[in-house]
Image (spheres, rainbow, N blue to C red):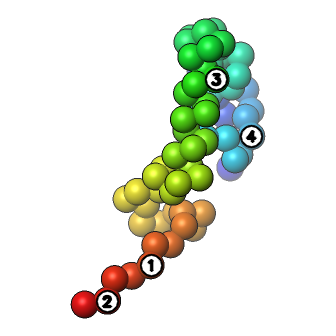
Amino acid sequence: MAKKCIYCKNGIDEESVIDFCERCGIGVWGEKMFKAIVSSMEKSRDNGDLFQGSVSDPKAPQSPRLSR
C-alpha cells in the first residue's frame, strides 16, 4: 500500500518518517520548523523510538529478550 500525504493525498516515499509531503509540511509549519521536525523524527527512527509498542509491524526492529 502506497503512503500518501495526510493533507493533499499525493504519494510520498514509503520510508518517510512523516505522513505528509514536503510542500504541505512547509506550508503548515514553515521551512525551518519542518526541517527540525523531519530531523527529529529521523533521529528517533534511527534510535528505534518510533517502533515502541509495535506488535505486528514486520518492519519494527526486534528488541532482545531479557532473561529471567
Mark nearer the viewer, 4 or 3: 3
Q: Residue at x 54, y 67 (%)?
A: 61
Question: Closer to the N terminus: mark 1 or mark 3?
Answer: 3
Residue marked by disc 3: 35
Q: Which mark is residue 67?
A: 2
- Element type at marker 3? helix
Nearest the viewer among 36 and 2 is 36
Q: Amino acid at mark 4?
A: Asp
First reached walking from the N terminus: tag 1 or tag 4: 4
Q: Give the CA separation, mark 2 to mark 3.
A: 41 Å
Question: Which residue is tagged 1?
Answer: 64
Residue 27 visible in image:
yes
Circles 1, 4 touching at the beta carbon (< 8 Å)? no
Q: Which residue is mark 4?
A: 13
Q: Nearer the viewer, mark 1 or mark 4?
A: 1
Q: CA distance from mark 1 to mark 3?
A: 32 Å
